[in-house]
Image (spheres, grey):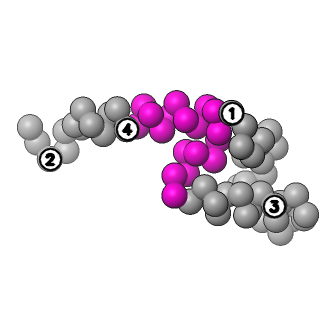
């Protein structure tokens, strides 16, 4: 197997993360989920205070949605 070939463990991890992202969109950010929550709180107070790249993400974002 070449070093660039995907392993089964990485494929299952990717699938698990994608499945969790459907339940909680911030879960796709892994250990940085707390940062997404902080940026979201900042966005709620003043959308112009966060990069416009976040606006589409937060448009239908529901924190902690299960």
* Residue interval drawn in magenta: 14-31
Mark 3 or 2: in front is 3
Q: Main secondary structure of the magenta part?
A: helix
Asked if residue 22 is among those painted magenta in the image, a careful observer would answer yes
- In the rendered structure, the answer to whether residue 16 lies left or right of residue 39 reads left
Q: CA distance from mark 3 to mark 4?
A: 29 Å
- 47 falls in the magenta region: no
| Residue matched to label 2 | 3
Report the disc number at residue 41.
3
The residue beneath circle 4 is: 13
Task: Give how far across and how far down residue 23 sits, in percent.
Answer: 63, 33
Give the foreground label among 1 and 3. 1
Lateral position of residue 14 relative to residue 8, left or right: right
Q: Are marks 3 and 4 in contact (CB under 8 Å)?
A: no
Q: Disc 2 or 4, which lies upstream in sequence?
A: 2
Q: Quadrant of the C terminus?
A: top right
**Dot in front, 2 or 1:** 1
Mark 2 or 1, nearer chain start: 2
Q: Mark on residue 66? A: 1
Classify residue 64 by image quadrant. top right
Looking at the rendered structure, the secondary structure element under dot 4 is: helix
Give the number of the mark in front: 1 or 4: 1
Residue 50's place in the image compared with 15, above or below, is below
- Relative placement, left or right, of 2 versus 26 is left
Q: Is residue 22 above or below residue 58?
A: above
Distance (Cα) linking label 3 and label 2: 41 Å
Circle nearer the N terminus (3, 4):
4
Query: Residue at 48% across / 38% down in the picture?
Result: 17
Mark 4, Cα crowd under 10 Å, few <14 / some 14-19 / many 20+, is few
Please provide percent x and percent y for residue 18.
Answer: 50, 34
Extreme-left residue of the structure: 1
């Amino acid at each position: 197997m070449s070093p660039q070939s995907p392993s089964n463990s990485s494929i299952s991890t990717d699938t698990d993360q994608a499945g969790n992202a459907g339940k909680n969109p911030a879960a796709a950010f892994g250990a940085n989920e707390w940062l997404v929550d902080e940026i979201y709180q900042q966005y709620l107070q003043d959308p112009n205070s966060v990069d416009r790249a976040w606006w589409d993400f937060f448009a239908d974002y529901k924190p902690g949605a299960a």
